[in-house]
Amino acid sequence: QVQLVESGGGLVQTGGSLRLSCRAWIDIFSMEKMAWYRRAPGKEREVIATINSAGTREFYKDPVKGRFTIERDNFKRFVYLQMNDLKPEDTATYFCNKEDGMLWPWGQGTQVTVSS
């Protein structure tokens, strides 16, 4: 069974940084486009960054463009999200999953709270 385990969240002040990690316990991880999603309080879960299977092409939604960086390590089966210059509006639970197709079961996510 596929398992996604996110970690690295926490409480940080405005302007601070965090690095999120997601371990994908699945053999075909290296074949899949991956994404980071977030769900802010009272809002729907949304995709914020994607990366192709080779890790050579990235896409970012406007709210995080220039501040966040998505990376992956196919050998270790990890996908990362480096978050810099954090803002209170980045407060959310962050998840990783496939970018498209039938998504894998969601992990528990990791909470990021940015204080003003």
Image (cartoon, rainbow, N blue to C red):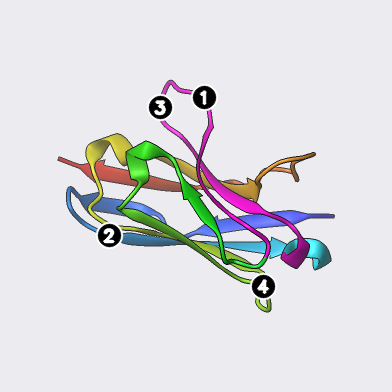
Going from N to C along the chain, the mark reached first, 2 or 4, is 2
From the image, state whether disc 2 or disc 3 is nearer to you: 2
Q: Residue at x 53, y 31 (%)?
A: 45
Tell me the distance, in whole angstroms, between the alpha carbons under discs 3 and 1.
Answer: 8 Å
Q: Which residue is mark 2?
A: 17
Circle 1 Cα neighbour tier, 10 Å, few/some/many (<14 / 14–19 / ≥20): few
16 part of magenta stretch: no
Q: Position of residue 31 (x, y in %)?
A: 77, 62
Tell me the distance, in whole angstroms, between the alpha carbons under discs 2 and 3.
Answer: 20 Å
Give the image quarter of residue 73.
bottom right
43 part of magenta stretch: yes
Q: Position of residue 72 (x, y in %)?
A: 57, 67
Circle 2 Cα neighbour tier, 10 Å, few/some/many (<14 / 14–19 / ≥20): some
Going from N to C along the chain, the mark reached first, 2 or 1, is 2
Extreme residue toward the left, this view: 116
Extreme residue toward the right, this view: 1
Secondary structure category for the residue under label 4: loop
Start-end of magenta stretch: 30-53
For the C terminus, the image quarter is: top left
Q: Can you see residue 94?
A: yes
Identify the amino acid type marked 2: Ser
From the image, state whether disc 2 or disc 4 is nearer to you: 4
Identify the amino acid type marked 4: Asn
**CB within 8 Å, label 4 to label 1:** no
Q: Residue at x 58, y 49 (%)?
A: 35
Q: Which residue is mark 1?
A: 44
Circle 4 Cα neighbour tier, 10 Å, few/some/many (<14 / 14–19 / ≥20): some
For the N terminus, the image quarter is: bottom right
Going from N to C along the chain, the mark reached first, 2 or 3, is 2
Tell me the distance, in whole angstroms, between the alpha carbons under discs 4 and 3.
Answer: 32 Å
Q: Which residue is mark 4?
A: 74
Q: Residue at x 45, y 22 (%)?
A: 43
